[in-house]
Amino acid sequence: MYEFDWSSIPGALPFLWAGMLLTLQITGVAIFFGIVLGTVIALFRLSKNRFLSGLAALYVTGFRSVPLVMVLLWFYLLVPQLITGLFGHFDLDIRLLSAFVAFALFEASYYAEIIRAGIQSVSRGQASAGLALGMTGGQAMRLIVLPQAFRRMIPLLLTQAIILFQDTSLVYVIGLSEFFGVAYNTGNRDGTLVELLLFAGAIYFIISFGVSLLVRVIQTKFAL
Amino acid sequence: MVIQAAGLDWSIFLKPAFDGSGTYLRFLFVGLEWTLLLSISAWVLAFVVGSIVGVLRTLPGKFLPMVGAVYVEIFRNVPLLVQLFLWYFVFPEIIPGLGTWFKQSVTPLLQQLIAGVLCLGFFTAARVAEQVRSGINSLGRGQRAAGLALGFNLYGVYRLVLLPVAYRIIVPTLTSEFLNTIKNSAVASTIGLAELSRQSQQLGEFTAHWYEAFIAVTLLYGVINIGVMIASRALESAIQMPGFVGGRQ
């Protein structure tokens, strides 16, 4: 039988906590910019302007046909070059910045599809009523359609956030030490990889499962 | 020269690869083969396991549906990368007998492939299960009741009445799940499996032609996507039924 040795976990807790904060930071940034940019892309995609809708479709299909691992590697290649090109030098953590940019742009393509479906689920009559009240198209979208659409989308947006939270572990490929990276490195260093990986898996499970239970409560309580 | 447009040197793909296996173009195609081998094997596993788990969740009684639900929650709430490392680093250590055999008697390359297929297969199975379940549930209780009334046992109802229709309904979502499997297979690069994204990183490291490597691989993923999409449309129209969504009226 395998002898488990959990002794390296208590000492590593502060580092694991710092890693978790980084994980949450990446998740938060990606959710915020993903939803903002995703809304813009969704509106482009629904626009009558062929050029804008084509551009948005290209963005969404492009990002959705490439593995996240490749997207992370791409931005880890591009971001440093762009920044040195723009500012000549940089004193930011380039891995972190690359991860922020990659996740924000990547998630935007997923959020855009959720938001587009949400907007389309609001009946046409709502927008027409707004226009009949003398609102401009933009006002009707902003004040009438989007609030209803977002309320309907909350469960899907949160589910996507859980997926995103789990996907942040992939920054491992660009050598960034968030929660998973810290767990892996600690396990490797102390020869307790088995215990650290099991521990990391358990923590991810508890958080993701907890939030998904919350989503179910929201779904029943806030349903329109 | 055309070949060096925009500062990129595409002739790199005609040069011999560092590992002596042929040109770098050949090197990339080896990656493509591994990506397809891994994704298709994992998909077969995911389809079988996912169908079983999905059916479990729709069976009468309490225990079996709960087993299905527990499976789905576990595999959906742990990141793919963590699951891969569990299959590759942890399970061979802690499973007595079989684990030791795996570490000592299986070649490293085969170890990577087996861990990758099991990880990706069981991970995707949780998603397939949810789709099989929603496909079966979308049929309504009448189908099941009619089957039972005709004298089929539960196995017969599933095999001859519910599943043939449910599978047809979920072909589009299964297609997108297969596309996800192909994309997720890139995670296997972290345990050293020489699939596409790993090969692009190696190519970049050994030749410093990062852009050429990444562009080529990104385009290859795009081509795979389009290919699967076309195949799935053909499949959909081949198996469609009159009266159902997408079918003839």
Image (cartoon, rainbow, N blue to C red):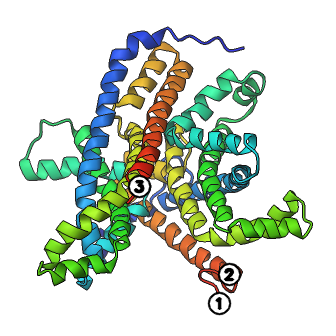
Mark 2 belongs to chain: B
Bin the neighbour count of mark 1 within 10 Å (Cα to Cα): few under 14, some 14-19, many 20 and up: few
Bin the neighbour count of mark 3 within 10 Å (Cα to Cα): few under 14, some 14-19, many 20 and up: some
Mark 3 belongs to chain: A
- The numbered mark at residue A205 is none
The picture quadrant where one finds residue B114 is top right
Residue at 59% x, 79% y: name it.
B233
Residue closer to the observer: A103 or A32: A32
Q: Are marks 1 and 2 on the same chain?
A: yes
- Disc 1 designates what residue? B248
Q: Is residue A3 visible?
A: yes
The picture quadrant where one finds residue A152 is bottom left
Residue at 71% x, 55% y: name it.
B51
Residue A39 falls left or right of residue B165: left
Secondary structure under the numbered disc 2 in the rendered image: loop
Residue at 49% x, 62% y: name it.
B25
Secondary structure under the numbered disc 1 in the rendered image: loop
Q: Is residue B193 above or below residue B108?
A: below
Q: Amino acid at mark 2?
A: Gln
- Disc 2 designates what residue? B240
Q: How far apart are labels 3 and 1 at the CA level?
A: 32 Å
Residue B192 falls left or right of residue B202: right
x and y percent of residue A94 in the render?
22, 39
Residue at 67% x, 21% y: name it.
B94
